[in-house]
Amino acid sequence: MSHETLIRNFIGYFGGSADGIRIFKAPGRVNLIGEHTDYNGGYVFPAALTLASTVLARPRQDNKIRLIATDLEVMVEAELEKLQNYKGLRWGNYQLGVADELIKSGYRVIGCDLMFDDKVPLGSGLSSSAAIEIATAVALVSLGDEAYGKTKKIDMIEMALISQRAEHNYVGVKCGIMDQFASAMGKKDHAIFLKCSDLSYELVPVKLDGYSLVISNTNKKRSLGEGKYNERRAQCEQGLEMLKKAFPEATCLADISRAEYEAHKHLLTDDVIRKRVEHVIYENQRVIDSVKALKEGNLKLFGELLNQSHNSLRDLYEVTGPELDTLVEEARKQEGVLGSRMTGAGFGGCTVSLVENSKIDNFIDSVGKAYREKIGYDASFYISEIGDGGREVEVEL
Ligand code: GLA
């Protein structure tokens, strides 16, 4: 939607004029490789997308936050003093969770009207929630700073950490930092090689010479609130406890190398726990190898690592399922495909495939047809464009 239309909608919902309306944006992300490593202190390699959440924001004179979305008919109204009361909301809890955590961190949040236009497909593994959180964080801090005459630049890493805490404490998903970090810190045409234990990172240009990253959406909705995600995280924590007999200093699974794991895996007496840990330790190394391969222009190796990552998420971490597996299997059969894997948490959502540009139409056609035959409904496809992280955008009229 154009800014003009968005502003017209905003005035339709909230009244007043265009005066004082500011526009903020934060993207979804695609993770190239490094899945379920973030909450284990490991490496990830995500890139921000151009698909984003846009929020129009305007201060109010009282202490209320009102929320609306262009694709929803409900308006949520919340009082800043009572933010604990709205945790059960079906829509609006990400935004109010962020407001709550900002206040707890000492930010001055003011009453405001916010209208969301969310273009990251919901529940698709492309971090629609992080996009909403980071857009909210940047909007609320910018409005508060303006009201109190503060001009300091917003600390975007802090915005990512605050948004992650909102997800933990308000929404109840014990997510890692990857999604919020990517949405906050993304850069056009770059992926972020991030070490999650200390948040050191490097922006790596994504040069794919004749190839593109094609995102395929299973259109199977999933919600991480269902518990499987937190269960995986708990299993990793149990695995770390078992391995601590050999590595008392280890603070996370990523502190343990492949060789160390192989020499001590007998300590993992539960077979399920052993599989989870093995995935994390090998996946972590695959991220390092992928970044190197990409820097050297070795797309073939990069593609093989994508394939290994999916197989491990399917067989060891067990977070794929028939929809994701079908998309990946069909993708790998196509000419011009170097690799394909699920991206994000799993349990539905999207895959990412490295496809030769001249073969993309054929890829979408053939994979789409096979998916419909096997699964019974349509997949959707997007060519990823890597965009910038969360920011204010100039109002264009
Ligand atoms: C979700 C979480 C992330 C990360 C991925 C899996 O997207 O929000 O923190 O754990 O799953 O890699």
Image: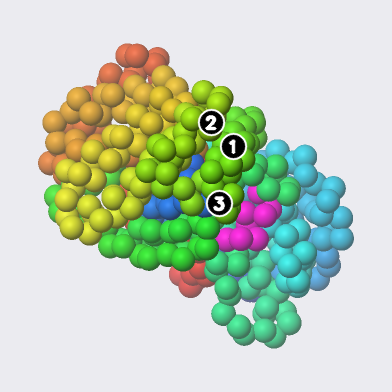
Mark 1 Cα shell of 10 Å, populated few (<14), some (14-19), many (≥20) = many
- Give the residue drawn at x 59%, y 49%: 248
Q: Nearer the viewer, residue 51 or 8?
A: 51
Calculate the distance from the C-alpha at mark 3 to the C-alpha at mark 2.
15 Å
Q: Horizontal placement of 38 versus 32: left or right?
A: right
Q: Is residue 147 above or below residue 221?
A: below
Residue 306: image x %, image y %? 30, 39
Q: Earlier in the sequence, mark 3 or mark 2?
A: 3
The residue where tag 2 is placed is 268
Q: Which residues are magenta?
A: 160-167
| Res. 242 mark | 1
The residue where tag 3 is placed is 250
Do residues under tags 1 and 2 come within 8 Å of each other at their CB atoms?
A: yes
Q: Earlier in the sequence, mark 3 or mark 1?
A: 1
Give the structural element (helix, strand or loop) at label 2.
loop
Task: Look at the image and tell me whether residue 308 can be seen.
Answer: yes
Mark 3 Cα shell of 10 Å, populated few (<14), some (14-19), many (≥20) = some
Amino acid type, label 3: Ala
